[in-house]
Amino acid sequence: MNQLSSFLGRHKGFACLVLLVLVATAFTASPAYAAAAKPIKWGFMVMKLAGGLAIFLYGMEMMGDALKVVAGDRMRDILGRLTTNRIMGVITSAGVTAVVQSSSITTVMLVGFVSAGLMSSVQSIGVIFGANIGTTITAQIIAFKVTKFALAMVAVGFVMWFAGRQEKIKQYGALILGLGLVFFGLTVMSGAMKPLRTYQPFIDLMQQVSNPAVGIIVAAAFTGLVQSSSATTGVVIAMATQGLISLEGGIALILGANIGTCITAALASIGKPREAVRVAVAHVTFNIIGVVCIVWFIPPFAELMRSISPASPELAGMERLAAETPRQIANAHTVFNVFFSLIMLPAVGLLARFTEIVVPHRVETPEQAALAKFQPRYLDDLLISTPPMALSMVRREVTRNGEVVEEMLSSVPETVFVGNVDEATRMREMDDRVDNLYAAIARYLSKVGRETLSERNADEAVALATANSEVENIGDIVETHMYHLATTCSANSIKFSEGDLTILNDYHGKVLDVFKTAVVAIEHDRREAAEKVLEREEEIVDGIDTLISERQKKWLKEDHTVEEMAAFNLMTDIMENMKRVYEHSKRMARLVTRQEFSTSLVVVPQE
């Protein structure tokens, strides 16, 4: 099912073409077509419709990709805003959906957040409300009669995108080019439908679509197939600009699109934790409730939209319908989604409780809990199409891996300093988790790198790949070298003096604190924390070097037992390895202060 979702998401134009060919075949095979006085060149019309829809969808995708890159840096704090409260979740979600031009993308990101445990099901419902509001921006944009400027926008956008030297200019060019293609695609589709204005069988069909049940089913099926309510909106408004559809029929189709768009979140939730499945259930339930509540009142609702929308009384018949209906449909779409979201906002708790009844909580066995520790928690392929969000999740996963290494480092005094081999073995086994998470992060970053990245996002991806390697390197130091030193201590029955243990614990505490600070700096991209790490170089590195040098000079002048020499050598090795831990921590800090970037190839571990 996930493969089906991915295929449909990446081949919307193909899916639309198949649907249009089926519709054309049904028309040409019907008795009404055979009896028509003036047959229409269906093959040519379907070609124009399919081409126009493909241009429209490509323009939407290009515009959305450019917007995500342009607004990527400002999307970095989106998660905090989404989880603040219900109202902020609605507002932020509406804004994000307006940016990416797709409620499906927002709900897919939402499934990813809930799967990662970053949001609760209650918080996610407010985001669903906002996504429904944000997707109405698409209808408002394409309802404006600016299609005559479409090719001018294509030309200007192409020049900026093709000839621009700065990344920001190129992305703004892609944005304008995409918007121009959206309008041009609408123009092509609208022109292709013009012959249908005098084709009685199609007019009769459109009258059937005015039946709410028929309109909702047709639009839900179309939207579910192409996984884009924006595509449905584009087709509906293209028909409306030719006067081929009434306002009542347009409202029914828009309502059907609201239901059909839920299929994307439903497919995305397959195989995800039960909390993520509840997001899909909430999305479907909310949209169906809204449609059921309004479907009985479509005629009065349509009259209300006519009263608040611009009118063209100087026109008559189909010409007036073509002039007024597009804006009326767009307004109906916006008013319905905003009004119903506001009404349902106080009932978020009830809707969340309903999803918990439909999808009850599953108790995790100890074996499942143990296995989950070795699996990435925040890396979700659903977020890869939005690189800024994906990179934020990588930060969290690197931090999670750092917490495992921190636990390993924390156990050094009671293992290495006293030669506790059993505890050292447990410490060594923890490195398996570190290696698994390291490999998963590296593979995920490789996938993110294939997306369109801004220069800043590309630098961030490289920095996170390097930070991931540094965390894994520290884990290897503990797993390999510290374990070896623990076995050496045990095998030779080495005992440190109280003075030596005090020194070892002191420097261990300093190095552990530095590593924890470096992880915080990476997680939050916090320069102040990184600078604290760099400031301690003299205290730790120079301090260790000075201590070892002075000890060596002193021991050359004195006689010592074999046991004392063994203890000194072991202490020197421990201190050298702690210094190496600091050096890796320092490099993590330099990534945050932008003093160092890895230019080496990132080796992606094989599955």
Image (cartoon, rainbow, N blue to C red):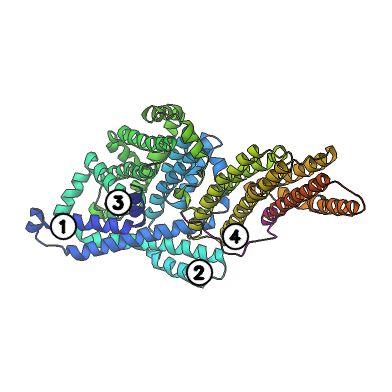
Q: Residue furthest front?
A: 562
Badge 2 amino acid: Met
Q: Position of residue 184 (x, y in %)?
A: 36, 63
**Labels 3 & 2 near each other (Cβ < 8 A):** no
Residue 601 within the magenta-colored segment of the rendering: yes
Pair 4/1: label in front: 4
Q: Secondary structure at mark 1?
A: helix
Q: Identify the residue position indicated by label 2 in the image.
A: 160
Residue 44 within the magenta-colored segment of the rendering: no
Decide which of tag 1 and tag 2 comes sooner along the chain: 1
Q: Badge 2 local density, few (<14 within 10 Å), some, or many (20+)?
A: many
Pair 3/4: label in front: 4
Q: Can the viewer see residue 77?
A: no
Badge 4 amino acid: Asp
How far separated are the C-alphas under marks 1 and 2?
Answer: 42 Å
Q: Position of residue 531 (x, y in %)?
A: 74, 51
Decide which of tag 2 and tag 4 comes sooner along the chain: 2
Give the residues drawn in magenta, as a range.
588-607
Q: Badge 4 local density, few (<14 within 10 Å), some, or many (20+)?
A: some
Residue 25 marker: 1
Decide which of tag 1 and tag 3 comes sooner along the chain: 1
Residue 236 marker: 3
Please state which of residues 89 and 363 is positioned toward the viewer in this rendering.
Answer: 363
How far separated are the C-alphas under marks 4 and 1?
Answer: 51 Å
Badge 1 amino acid: Thr
Q: Is residue 298 left or right of residue 356?
A: left
